[in-house]
Image (tube, rainbow, N blue to C red):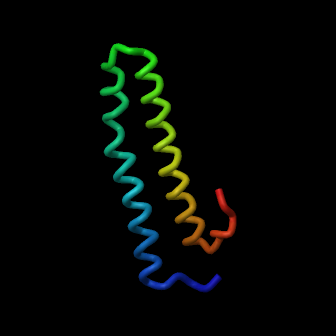
Amino acid sequence: MEPLSQSESEAIAQIKEICHRIVREMMPLQPTIGKLQDGAVRQTLYENVYQLTAQLETVKKQAIRYEKGDANRVL
């Protein structure tokens, strides 16, 4: 793979930063969800927040692989 162009490097940096910001913004959800009385609703929300976090990490890791020239390995 050829070296990344400057715009690609900037895009990768933005992707990683945006994913990081979203995860940080989601952190207050855990204690807030814990205040709900319905256990089934709490459990569903916890699971969905976990899935969102996992998907964001996958996006970030794929961007890092692209940056390192290893984007062909799909997560």
- For the point 47% across and 43% down, the residue is 52
Quadrant in which the C terminus appears? bottom right
Left or right for 19, reference 68: left
* For residue 19, above or below residue 44: below
Instruction: Please state which of residues 19 and 37 is positioned toward the viewer in this rendering.
Output: 37
Quadrant in which the N terminus appears? bottom right
Instruction: Please state which of residues 39 and 19 is positioned toward the viewer in this rendering.
Output: 39
Would you identify the image quadrant in which residue 61 lies? Answer: bottom right
Would you identify the image quadrant in which residue 3 lies? Answer: bottom right
| Name of the residue lying farthest toward the right | 73
Instruction: Please state which of residues 32 and 40 is positioned toward the viewer in this rendering.
Output: 40
- For the point 40% across and 75% down, the residue is 10
* For residue 68, above or below residue 28: below
* For residue 1, above or below residue 12: below
Left or right for 12, reference 37: right
- For the point 69% across and 64% down, the residue is 73
- For the point 58% across and 70% down, the residue is 66
Q: Position of residue 23 (x, y in %)?
A: 39, 46
Q: Position of residue 60 (x, y in %)?
A: 50, 58
Would you identify the image quadrant in which residue 70 lies? Answer: bottom right
Q: Position of residue 54 (x, y in %)?
A: 52, 45
Q: Position of residue 7 (x, y in %)?
A: 42, 81
Total marks shown come to 0
